[in-house]
Image (spheres, rainbow, N blue to C red):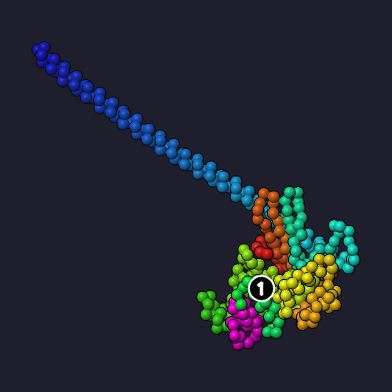
Amino acid sequence: MFMSFHRTGFKMSVKIHKKSSLTTTCFSSKRGLALIMVLWILTVLSVLALSFAFMARTEVYSTITFRDGIENKLLAEAGIERGIVELFYRSANKNQTSAVEGSEIVRIDGRYNEGEFGEDKYSFSIADESGKININALTDANAIVLNNLMVNLGIPGETANIIVDSILDWKDEDNLRRLNGAEDSYYESLPVPYKAKNGNLDTLEELLLIRGVTPEILFGEKNRPGLINYLTVYSKGFAINLNAAPKEVIAALPNMTSSMADKIIEFRESAELRGQQDAIAIIGDVFRTLGPYISFSESNIYTVEGRGMKKSNVRWYAIRAVLAVESNNQYRYLYYKSPSDVRK
C-alpha cells in the first residue's frame, strides 16, 4: 500500500513538474512576443517621428527659400523702377554740361549701377536699343556686322555663316535658300515641322526657331555672353549708335579693331560723341568707311535690367524689360520677362 502510494505520488509529482515547466515556457514565449511587438511599435514610431521631423525641416527651408525668392524679386523690381526714374531724369537733364556728384545722368550703354536697401542689394542697367544690331533690318549688305560679332564672341565661323544666312532666309518672302541658309524644306524635315516665317521677328527668343541658333548661343554660357545682349528687334533702321553700343558691337563694325573700340569707350567715359568729327579724331580716317553702319542719335526705346539679391543669398534674381519712353513722362512696356537669366 505504501509503495504503491509512493509510486503514485512520484508519478503525480512528475506530472505536476511537467505542467509547471509548460506553464513557465508559455509565459516566457508571451513575454518574448510582447517584447518584439513593443520593439516594432517603437521602431515604427521612431520612423514616423523622423519622417515628420524631416518633412517639417523641408517645409521650413522651402518657406525660407520662397520668402527669399520673393524678396529678391521685389529688389529686382525696385531696380527696374529705379532705371525708369533715371531715364526720365536723363531726358530732362541730358544736355547739362556739368553736374555735382550724385546728380550725374545715367549711362545708356548697358553698364550696371548698384543700389542698396539696408543690407540687401539691387542693381540696374539701361541700354539704348539704338546701340544694338537690329536683326529685322539685317540685309546681305550689312550682315557682316552680325557675322563679325559672333566670330569675336568665339562662335565658329561656319556656325556664324549658317546663322546669318538662315536669319535672312527666315525673314525674306521667297523660298530660295542662301548658300548656308534654310527655308521651308529644312524646317519641315525637323521632328516637329514648321515653316519659315517670311517676316520680321517679334522677339529675340524667336531666333531659337532659326537654324544654327541654340540656347547657349542666344543666352550665353559660363565663359561667353549671349547674342541676346547685343541684338534688338525694336530699333528703327540698322545704324548703330556709337554712344550706346557696347564694345563688342563697336568692334564688330567693318575695319574696326579692338583698340579702336577701346578708344571710343574711353572717350565716352567723359563725354558723348557729337558727330563725325569726334569719331574721326578718335579713330582716324577709318571712320569714313563706317558711314552706312553708325549713327549718334539716341532712341526712345530702352532695355532695362533689374537684379536683386538679399544679403543671405549668392544668386541674383533678374528681370529684363524693354520699354518705350513717351511724352509727358509716360512709358509703355514692349517686353517684360521675370525671371530673366541673362548672362553677361
Task: State the residue at coordinates (65%, 55%).
Answer: 315
Q: Residue at x 69, y 69 (%)?
A: 229
- Looking at this view, name the residue that lies furthest to the top: 2
Q: Magenta part of the protein: which range?
A: 158-182
Relative to 9, residue 61 above or below: below
- Between 187 and 310, the one lying in front of the other is 310
Determine the image quadrant of residue 246: bottom right
Characterize the local packing of mark 1: few (<14), some (14-19) or many (20 or more) Cα atoms within 10 angstroms. Answer: some
Q: Pick whichever, 72 or 56, lies toward us.
A: 72
Q: Is residue 291 visible?
A: no
Instruction: Report the amino acid beneath label 1.
Output: Asn
Which sits in the foreground, 13 or 184? 184
Pinpoint residue 58: horizontal percent, then vertical percent.
56, 47
Residue 120 is left or right of residue 19, and the answer is: right
Front position in the image: 131 or 271: 271
Q: Is residue 165 magenta?
A: yes
Where residue 36 sits: x, y (%)?
A: 37, 35
Find residue 155 and report its image quarter.
bottom right
Residue 289, position as x, y percentages in the image: 77, 82
Q: Residue at x 90, y 66 (%)?
A: 97
